[in-house]
């Protein structure tokens, strides 16, 4: 086989690999035409079915649910479902608040006091102040949501520790505290502040 | 891998982040497309400079059209010869590298082997780009000297032989990067430091590459040089 024929066969393979990469929407598929042997092993590797990333709130609640469901000897007085619903409701409330503030922020673009005409100076300053206040509120709301999520995860950890440390009384006490603490937005906020 | 993060930063400062990108086959494909231009660019730039110096200094290196021909052609030919020789050696050595990894006790898929080979090549190219100004300065200094007697031999030595050796010197950086990468893989798998495993693997891989790459580069230089107009 002459070198030119060898090159043609090589490039033909490259064309196939480049087409496969393009079909998978991999950026830079054109590089595969001359350098296909470097792409081929990864291209032939089995692709694990990628799970869509779960939102943090359902994931935290799901983890807490799994921890609770795996814990034997739950106290009869504690309604796990009610407690979990309260936790989720509270967290979603915090998230909604943060989103609403973000939407309000996006909707209002304040005039720059430096660029505003003199007659609108006072208005621009007031708008800038409102905007700054909204930004502060949003970071406060985000921090609150973050703290609440951390608190729920920490609670999950406590339930797991209590379960494996073999203290059913401790598990019951923790779960009872959870049930009492989380019941709506205000309670989740309390939980976050603890 | 964070697409916003510069590749040079990943190669030199955050090899662990690059590990994560090479671990998943899907991410490895796009990482390959990011590493390739850097690896190619380094070799092409170096080849172009060497081609230029070879023609300007009329160094008696084979093939004649490269040394005494049109500078632009020589730049292209030497650059292509390096790319062909180095990538050819990498690609031809991939199956052996996978076999060496298995012998060294590193359980690693072929896709990761290809990714690591390219990481080594890109790291070497980066170091080569760093050495390029030194080579260029030395070469330009020598081309200014009259071509006679002992000076001609010195030119051949520096521009020709030293020039052909420099990419392999820069390749040591790639070898070190490769050794560290396989060390991390092994630590992640075994949870302990087993220095001999990656050392044997990288040594065998380097010997194979060092044996094949110069032969491939010289053969391509000869082939492409002969095709050049005299």
Image (cartoon, coloured by chain):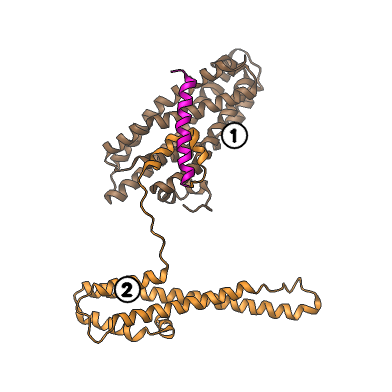
Q: How many marks?
A: 2
Q: Is residue B88 above or below residue A122?
A: above
Report helix, strand or loop for mark 2: helix
Taking depth in this image into account, of A56 and B74 the one nearest to the observer is A56
Element type at mark 1: helix
Tell me the subunit letter for badge 1: B
Which region of the structure is painted magenta?
A: A1-24
Q: Which mark is residue A64?
A: 2
Circle 1 packing at 10 Å, graded few (<14), some (14-19), many (20+), is few
Q: Quick check: A165 left or right of A181? A: left
- Discs 2 and 1 lie in a common subunit: no
Q: Position of residue A157 (x, y in %)?
A: 30, 72
- The chain in brown: B
Q: Is residue B200 visible?
A: no
In the image, A14 versus B178, the foreground residue is A14
- State the CA–CA distance, disc 2 to disc 1: 60 Å
Percent position of residue B190, x then y: 27, 49
Image coordinates of residue B3 in percent, x first then y, are: 51, 52
Give the letter of the orange chain. Answer: A
- To which quarter of the image does residue B46 belong? top right
**Which residue is labeled 1 in the image?**
B133
Q: Is residue A1 above or below residue A173?
A: above
Q: Is residue A4 above or below residue A170?
A: above
**Main SS, magenta residues:** helix
């Amino acid at each position: 086989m002459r070198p030119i024929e060898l090159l043609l066969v090589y490039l033909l393979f490259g064309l196939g690999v480049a087409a496969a990469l393009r079909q998978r929407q991999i950026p830079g598929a054109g590089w595969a035409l001359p350098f296909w042997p470097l792409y081929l092993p990864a291209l032939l590797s089995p692709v694990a079915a990628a799970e869509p990333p779960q939102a943090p709130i359902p994931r935290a609640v799901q983890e807490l649910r799994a921890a609770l469901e795996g814990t034997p000897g739950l106290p009869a007085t504690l309604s796990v479902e009610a407690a979990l619903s309260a936790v989720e409701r509270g967290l979603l409330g915090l998230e909604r608040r943060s989103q609403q503030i973000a939407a309000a922020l996006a909707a209002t673009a304040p005039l720059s006091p430096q660029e505003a005409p003199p007659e609108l100076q006072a208005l621009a300053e007031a708008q800038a102040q409102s905007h700054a206040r909204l930004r502060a509120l949003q970071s406060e709301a985000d921090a609150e949501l973050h703290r609440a999520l951390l608190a729920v995860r920490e609670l999950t950890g406590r339930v797991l520790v209590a379960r494996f440390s073999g203290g059913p009384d401790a598990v019951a006490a923790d779960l009872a505290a959870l049930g009492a603490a989380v019941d709506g937005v205000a309670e989740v906020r309390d939980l976050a502040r603890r | 891998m964070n697409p916003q993060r510069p590749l040079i930063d990943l190669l030199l400062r955050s090899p662990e982040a690059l590990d994560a990108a090479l671990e998943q086959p899907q991410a490895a494909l796009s990482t390959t497309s990011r590493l390739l231009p850097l690896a190619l660019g380094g070799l092409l730039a170096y080849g172009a400079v060497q081609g230029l110096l070879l023609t300007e200094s009329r160094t008696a290196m084979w093939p004649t059209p490269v040394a005494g021909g049109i500078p632009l052609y020589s730049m292209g030919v030497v650059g292509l010869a390096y790319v062909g020789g180095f990538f050819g050696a990498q690609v031809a050595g991939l199956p052996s590298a996978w076999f060496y990894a298995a012998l060294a006790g590193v359980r690693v898929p072929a896709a990761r082997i290809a990714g690591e080979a390219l990481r080594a090549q890109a790291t070497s190219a980066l170091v080569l780009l760093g050495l390029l100004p030194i080579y260029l300065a030395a070469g330009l200094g020598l081309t200014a000297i009259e071509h006679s007697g002992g000076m001609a031999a010195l030119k051949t030595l520096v521009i020709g032989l030293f020039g052909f050796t420099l990419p392999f010197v820069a390749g040591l950086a790639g070898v070190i990067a490769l050794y560290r990468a396989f060390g991390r893989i092994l630590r992640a798998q075994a949870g302990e430091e087993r220095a001999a495993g990656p050392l044997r693997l990288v040594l065998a891989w380097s010997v194979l590459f060092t044996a094949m790459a110069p032969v491939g580069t010289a053969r391509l230089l000869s082939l492409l040089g002969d095709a050049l107009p005299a």
